[in-house]
Amino acid sequence: MSLPTSNEAKKPGAQQNPPLVVSIDKNGQLHFGEDDEVVTPQQLRTRLLAKIESLRKANKEVRLAIRADKQAPWFRIVYVMDLAKEAKVNSLNAFTKEVKSK
């Protein structure tokens, strides 16, 4: 997956409480879960909302990150953002790769 670059990219493992991650490949295919399983938009909605509810019941912070290929269709990214809003997720981030200094 080819991630977009950012000067603000964080190093992997910098946070102890990892976010839920939704990946979107360059073809718009959605992936979710620890095993990066391919899911349909409806499966993502069902599984993501259930996982968020489970985290809240356990009094855990709910954070979501989008790992989208830089060529991923924008409508898929917006779909995930809309799910986050529906679930009232306050922390939504995007995975990027660090810009290499010259």
Image (spheres, helix red, strand yellow):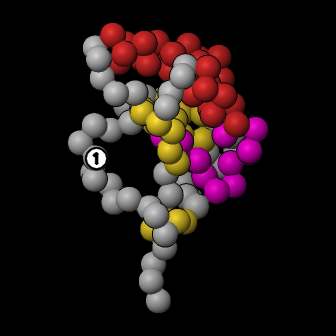
**Which residue position holds label 1?**
15
Q: Amino acid at mark 1?
A: Gln
Outermost residue on the bottom side: it is 102
Please give left or right for residue 59 compared with residue 85 in the image. Answer: left
State the image coordinates of residue 29 (x, y, percent, origin top left). 64, 36
Task: Determine if the magenta segment contains residue 79.
Answer: no
Magenta region, residue range:
65-77
In front of the other: 45 or 58: 58
- Disc count in the image? 1
**Secondary structure type for disc 1:** loop
State the image coordinates of residue 5 (x, y, percent, origin top left). 54, 66
Q: Residues within 10 Å of mark 1 (few under 14, many from 20)?
A: few
Q: In this picture, is 13 found above or below 99?
A: above
Task: Determine if the magenta segment contains residue 72.
Answer: yes
State the image coordinates of residue 54 (x, y, percent, origin top left). 37, 12
Please give left or right for residue 91 compared with residue 76 in the image. Answer: left
Residue that appears at 50% across and 20% down: 48
State the image coordinates of residue 85 (x, y, percent, origin top left). 61, 26
| Quarter residue 76 falls in | top right
Please give left or right for residue 70 compared with residue 90 in the image. Answer: right
Residue that appears at 50% across and 45% down: 93
Q: In this picture, is 27 found above or below 49?
A: below
Q: Quadrant of the N terminus?
A: bottom right
Q: Is residue 17 visible?
A: yes
Residue that appears at 58% across and 47% down: 68
